[in-house]
Image (spheres, rainbow, N blue to C red):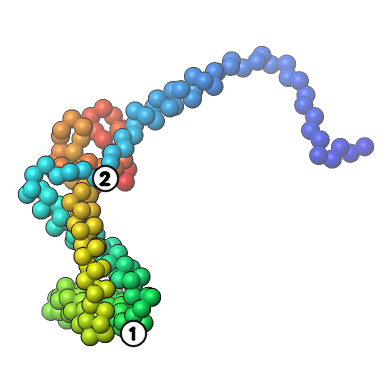
Amino acid sequence: MASYGTTTLRPTTSSPSPTISRDDESEESTRKYLNSFHITCPFNIPSTPESAAVRIIKNLAKFSLYYAIFVWTVLFITLIPQRKVSLILLVAMTEVTVLYFLLLRALPNSVVLHRIIDKRVVLFLLFTITSVELILTDAFIHLFATLSATIPIILLHAVLTKRDEVFVNEEGRGAGELVPLVEERVSDAEPVNLV
């Protein structure tokens, strides 16, 4: 008769294998894990006003897209209940900006787009046009309230955020004031960045 789905275990005549305590293995692996990873906070207070200014400039350059999206989102939310025309104009200027960036990406070798016309100038012009449109549609209170609420948050983030491009080891070796987010020690002499 066939035995469907059942398994038969046959006893072996070989000697039993030595047992290793599972507690010792897990404790040893936990100890290795804790010794190999160091998690640090990506925020700290700068030591001097000069380092704070440098950090603001570098972080504004690094996170500028995220800051712009943050301001745009808050402005969009404040315009939803009352200012429908201003909202449509804001979305239209956003589309123009997106099309400009798509054009930049589609033509990477264009001398006119990349060297003659600076991206910052175009973005400043688009910001100015958008601001004028919002002022003309009586949404300037929303614009100024949004800017006055979001700019302090952005500056606070820019001051407190450490960039992770320059590293300092725990022993004080290395350049700069910044520490990697996650670091694994391959040996006692040299840490390796995992981020």
Q: Which residue, given by chain and number where applicable, does mark 2 sit on? A: 42
Q: Give whichever of 64, 109 is nearer the camera.
A: 64
Mark 2 lies on a secondary structure that is loop
Q: Which residue, given by chain and number where applicable, does mark 1 sit on? A: 85
Outermost residue, right side: 1
Q: Give whichever of 114, 177 is nearer the camera.
A: 177
Q: Which mark is residue 161?
A: none
Which of the 4 quarters of the picture holds residue 117? bottom left
- Residue 100: give x, y in percent of width and height: 27, 79
Decide: few, some or many residues near mark 2? Use Cα within 10 Å; few <14, some 14-19, many ≥20: some
Locate the N terminus and report the quarter of the image it occupies: top right
- Residue 8: give x, y in percent of width and height: 80, 29
Asked whether disc 1 touches disc 2, contact meaning CB atoms under 8 Å apart, the reply is no
Q: Is residue 96 visible?
A: no
Outermost residue, left side: 50
* Horizontal arrangement in the rendering, residue 30 relative to residue 10 (left or right): left
Decide: few, some or many residues near mark 1? Use Cα within 10 Å; few <14, some 14-19, many ≥20: some
**Vertical arrangement, residue 18 with respect to residue 58, above or below:** above
Tell me the residue at 39%/30% (across/down): 33
Q: Give whichever of 106, 40 is nearer the camera.
A: 40
Tell me the residue at 17%/43% (across/down): 45
Q: Amino acid type of disc 1?
A: Val
Q: First in sequence: mark 1 or mark 2?
A: 2
Q: Amino acid type of disc 2?
A: Pro
- Residue 13: give x, y in percent of width and height: 73, 16
Which of the 4 quarters of the picture holds residue 38? top left
Tell me the residue at 62%/17% (across/down): 17
